[in-house]
C-alpha cells in the first residue's frame, strides 16, 4: 500500500471540481502582518486565500502549488496575485526573504513524515526571524466515519493516513506531530474550528499561529 506516490493527476483534476474552505482570520492576520509584507501561500490551490489577501490591501502576495492546473485556475481567478508551480522540495525563495507564509490544508496532502519535515524546513529557511507561519490542517478526528478508515488503512499506511475512493491519499495528525514538525518555530496560539473538507464533509481543523525563532 503506497501512500507517498505521485498524486499529481488527482490534484490537477481537482482544480475545477473541489472547493477549499478553511477560513482565514483576516482581522487577526491584518494586525500581525504589514500590508507591504512579502507573503507566500504554499499549496495555494485555486488562489482563494491569495485573492482574499489582495482584497485586504496586501501588495506582495505569491501563491505556489505543485499542480499546474491549480495554478492555472488561480491565475484566472485572482489576477492581483502572482503564482508559480513548485513541488515544495526547494521553495523558490531566498533565505529569510518571507515575512509571512500560509500553509492551509497542505500537510494533510503529504502523508510522508520526511516530506512534511522537509517542507517545514524550507519555511524555516525562507522566513525571516520572527516571520509568521500560519498553518491550518486536520488533527485526528473522532467521528465514526474517520475512525473506521484510520483503522482500515493503519496496517499499511500508519494510523491517521487513508485513501479516498477516488484515489487520493490524505493524512490526519496527532496533536504531538504538529509540535514535532514545527521544530524551530514558536507556536503563539492554536485555534480549533469547524470547517468543511474538499468533499463537503464537516471536520474539526486546527490553526497554528507560529513564529520562526531566531
Image (spheres, rainbow, N blue to C red):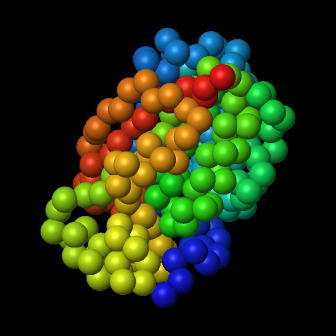
- Observer-nearest of 9 and 160: 160
- Observer-nearest of 11 and 90: 90
Question: In the image, what residue occupies the spot 61% across and 26% down?
Answer: 213
Image quadrant in which the C terminus is located:
top right
Q: Is residue 15 visible?
A: no
Question: In the image, what residue occupies the spot 35% across and 78% down?
Answer: 154
In x, y percent, where is residue 190?
A: 36, 32
- Vertical placement of residue 166 versus 208, above or below: below
Q: Taking 115 as reference, is 128 left or right?
A: right
In x, y percent, where is residue 211?
A: 55, 26
- Vertical placement of residue 205 versus 211, above or below: below
- Observer-nearest of 47 and 112: 112
In x, y percent, where is residue 147?
A: 22, 69
In x, y percent, where is residue 174?
A: 35, 55
Q: Taking 68 as reference, is 200 left or right?
A: left
Question: In the image, what residue occupies the spot 34% across and 71% down?
Answer: 159
Amino acid at each position: 500500500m503506497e501512500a507517498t506516490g505521485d498524486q499529481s493527476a488527482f490534484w490537477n483534476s481537482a482544480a475545477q471540481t473541489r472547493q477549499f474552505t478553511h477560513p482565514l482570520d483576516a482581522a487577526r492576520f491584518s494586525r500581525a502582518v504589514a500590508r507591504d509584507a512579502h507573503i507566500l501561500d504554499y499549496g495555494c490551490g485555486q488562489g482563494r486565500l491569495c485573492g482574499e489577501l489582495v482584497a485586504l490591501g496586501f501588495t506582495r502576495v505569491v501563491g505556489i502549488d505543485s499542480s499546474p492546473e491549480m495554478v492555472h485556475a488561480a491565475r484566472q481567478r485572482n489576477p492581483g496575485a502572482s503564482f508559480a508551480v513548485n513541488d515544495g522540495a526547494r521553495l523558490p525563495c531566498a533565505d529569510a526573504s518571507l515575512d509571512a507564509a500560509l500553509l492551509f490544508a497542505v500537510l494533510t496532502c503529504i502523508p510522508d513524515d520526511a516530506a512534511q519535515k522537509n517542507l517545514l524546513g524550507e519555511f524555516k529557511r525562507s522566513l525571516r526571524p520572527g516571520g509568521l507561519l500560519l498553518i491550518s490542517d486536520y488533527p485526528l478526528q473522532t467521528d465514526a466515519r474517520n475512525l473506521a478508515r484510520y483503522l482500515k488503512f493503519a496496517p499499511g499506511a500508519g494510523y491517521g493516513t487513508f485513501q479516498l475512493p477516488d484515489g487520493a491519499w490524505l493524512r490526519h495528525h496527532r496533536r504531538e506531530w504538529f509540535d514535532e514538525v514545527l521544530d524551530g518555530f514558536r507556536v503563539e496560539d492554536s485555534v480549533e474550528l469547524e470547517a468543511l473538507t474538499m468533499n463537503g464533509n464537516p471536520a474539526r481543523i486546527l490553526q497554528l499561529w507560529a513564529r520562526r525563532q531566531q
